[in-house]
Image (cartoon, rainbow, N blue to C red):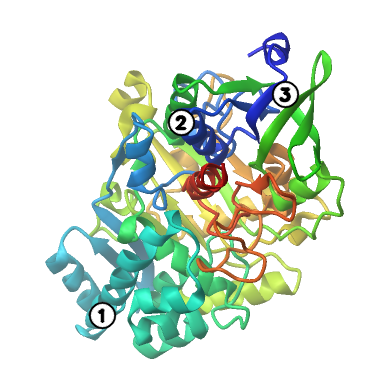
């Protein structure tokens, strides 16, 4: 949409600042309810971090460049908005290679209960760890069934949610004591312990026993998605979701104005005025409600207030295109299975603790932990037909325990150093170097790119490079949270980004809840 078109109407029921997936969810709901809606997006496209792009010159591969898997998106939102969007389930949950007694082996989770049971027994020498695994994830599965539906309802109190969970053991394990206690009580094998703990550390710089329980909140959101905890592959890449959301919002009558950067919000308790900037100058739009699909820091800046300290991001995101999947040292596993689920690297329990301690001391982890998966094995549509025919595959790597502070001295140099050591950890489990499998772009360069927290701060305006905007919240009401978890101290101004209560991840939940707050208060 051009700046001229945005000026045709100067007053709206709702102005949404930011065209990421949450802003688009809110816009679609509100437009479908008959409200006039303007979405202001500073970039030349919508989608935020949930986009598909072709990062390698002259290569027909559309990668989920930032966000890459879906778990927390409620089916309710897909149905309500009539989204043309599909997910595919991964048949393998995870594979974790390890060397034991000089032998390359590993743990494959998935492919059926009997196969998983045998994999545990082969690694640990008995059935004890698998039985513990079944009990533990049976408990989290029951909790997920009860907690996930509450995310699109008004915030429950802590007591109400506890009654809904109706399982004192689950409540204690996830809501009251550090997750490390449960991991150590229930599992004996270091590798199994590490695989369990990783869900508490995605984008979260914390130890297993952090007294703040920030790791518990991260773990909770990673095991409740869809009421099952499954993490699925978006068909067509993550951009397929945000394209479907943009289409739904437009069909309902919302105006999506790209290249329009909101720079100021003035609220008087009865309404608000949003000032925005384009290449042609400044403009304003009045609204009864303003929904800010951005960080809490951006919200404060728009309102002319002192922004809170940013929460530090702690991840390395690497996108790759391969000519072929590498062979594994563990020959009992087909690489097509190992890489189709989550491929854990250097994520034993003690390895994770050591990496955290080193990073906390200001050093890059000597053995950087990471997890990898191959999107194209589950969804080959993200590759052009010629690449599929030639056997090309994508790899996505997500590194842990790499806080933004480590990159402050020289982001480019540290990025390269960390990437090299991270890939060395992977190579230790491969029968051939990963570098031999990398495709090259039209200019002969290896198809690999890495993004640090500082890169995400620069590319996406994520303060501190934190993918959740701030530490994840408990899914119940706390002081100042409001009825839906999106309210601010300014009447008519709502926070609908990942920093809202029950935000984080590709969920659309804050967008849904902000829309409900508007409609409920109208």
For disc 3, the neighbor class at 10 Å (few under 14, some 14 to 19, many from 20) is many
Tell me the quadrant of the picture where the N terminus can be found: top right
Which corner quadrant of the image does residue 127 belong to?
bottom left
Mark in the foreground, 1 or 3:
3
For disc 2, the neighbor class at 10 Å (few under 14, some 14 to 19, many from 20) is many
The image shows residue 177 at horizontal and vertical percentages of: 51, 86
136 vs 369, left or right, is left
Q: Is residue 34 above or below residue 111?
A: above
Asked if residue 310 can be seen in this view, the reply is: yes
Q: CA gap, disc 1 to disc 2? A: 38 Å
Which numbered dot is residue 245?
2
Tell me the quadrant of the picture where the C terminus can be found: top right
Q: Earlier in the sequence, mark 1 or mark 2?
A: 1
Mark in the foreground, 1 or 2:
2
- SS for callout 1: helix
Q: Which residue is mark 1?
A: 135
Q: Is residue 141 above or below residue 43?
A: below
Q: Nearer the viewer, residue 171 or 414?
A: 171
Q: Which residue is mark 3?
A: 260
Q: Nearer the viewer, residue 465 or 336?
A: 465
Q: Earlier in the sequence, mark 3 or mark 2?
A: 2
Which corner quadrant of the image does residue 442 belong to?
top right
Q: CA gap, disc 3 to disc 2? A: 19 Å
Q: CA gap, disc 1 to disc 3? A: 51 Å
């Amino acid at each position: 949409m051009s700046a001229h078109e945005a000026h045709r109407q100067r007053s709206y029921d709702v102005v949404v600042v930011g065209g990421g997936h949450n802003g688009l969810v809110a816009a679609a709901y509100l437009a479908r309810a008959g409200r006039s809606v303007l979405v202001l997006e500073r970039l030349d496209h919508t989608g935020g971090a949930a986009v598909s792009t072709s990062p390698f010159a002259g290569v027909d591969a559309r990668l989920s460049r930032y966000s890459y898997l879906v778990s927390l998106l409620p089916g309710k939102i897909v149905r309500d908005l009539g989204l043309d969007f599909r997910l595919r389930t991964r048949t393998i949950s995870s594979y974790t290679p390890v060397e034991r007694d000089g032998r390359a082996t590993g743990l494959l989770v998935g492919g059926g209960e009997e196969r998983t049971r045998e994999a545990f027994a082969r690694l640990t020498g008995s059935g004890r760890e698998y039985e513990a695994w079944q009990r533990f994830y049976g408990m989290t599965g029951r909790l997920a069934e009860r907690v996930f539906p509450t995310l699109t309802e008004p915030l429950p109190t802590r007591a109400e949610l506890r009654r809904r969970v109706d399982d004192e053991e689950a409540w204690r394990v996830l809501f009251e004591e550090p997750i490390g206690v449960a991991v150590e009580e229930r599992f004996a094998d270091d590798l199994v312990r590490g695989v369990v703990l990783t869900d508490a550390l995605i984008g979260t710089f914390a130890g297993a026993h952090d007294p703040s329980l920030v790791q518990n909140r991260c773990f909770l959101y990673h095991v409740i998605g869809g009421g099952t905890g499954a993490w699925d592959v978006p068909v067509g890449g993550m951009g397929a979701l945000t394209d479907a959301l943009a289409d739904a919002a437009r069909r309902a009558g919302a105006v999506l104005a790209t290249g329009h950067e909101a720079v100021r919000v003035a609220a008087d308790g009865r309404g608000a005025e949003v000032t925005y900037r384009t290449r042609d100058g400044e403009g304003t739009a009045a609204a009864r409600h303003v929904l800010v699909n951005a960080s809490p820091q951006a919200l404060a800046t728009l309102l002319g207030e002192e922004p809170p300290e940013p929460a530090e991001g702690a991840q390395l995101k690497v996108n790759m295109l391969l000519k072929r999947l590498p062979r594994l040292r563990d020959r009992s596993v087909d690489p097509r299975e190992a890489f189709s689920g989550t491929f854990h690297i250097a994520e034993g329990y003690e390895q994770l603790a050591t990496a955290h301690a080193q990073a906390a001391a200001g050093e890059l982890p000597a053995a950087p932990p990471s997890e990898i998966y191959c999107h194209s094995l589950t969804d080959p549509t993200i590759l052009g037909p010629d690449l599929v025919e030639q056997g090309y595959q994508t790899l996505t790597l997500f590194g842990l325990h790499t806080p933004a502070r480590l990159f402050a001295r020289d982001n480019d140099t540290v990025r390269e150093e960390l990437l090299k050591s991270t890939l060395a950890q992977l190579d230790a489990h491969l029968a051939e170097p990963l570098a031999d499998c990398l495709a090259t772009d039209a200019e002969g360069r290896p198809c690999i790119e890495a993004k640090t927290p500082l890169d995400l701060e620069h590319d996406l305006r994520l303060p501190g490079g934190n993918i959740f905007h701030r530490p994840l919240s408990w899914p119940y009401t706390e002081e100042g949270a409001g009825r839906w978890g999106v309210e601010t101290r300014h009447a008519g101004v709502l926070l609908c980004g990942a920093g809202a209560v029950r935000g984080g991840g590709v969920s659309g939940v804050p967008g849904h809840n902000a829309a409900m707050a508007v409609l409920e208060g109208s």
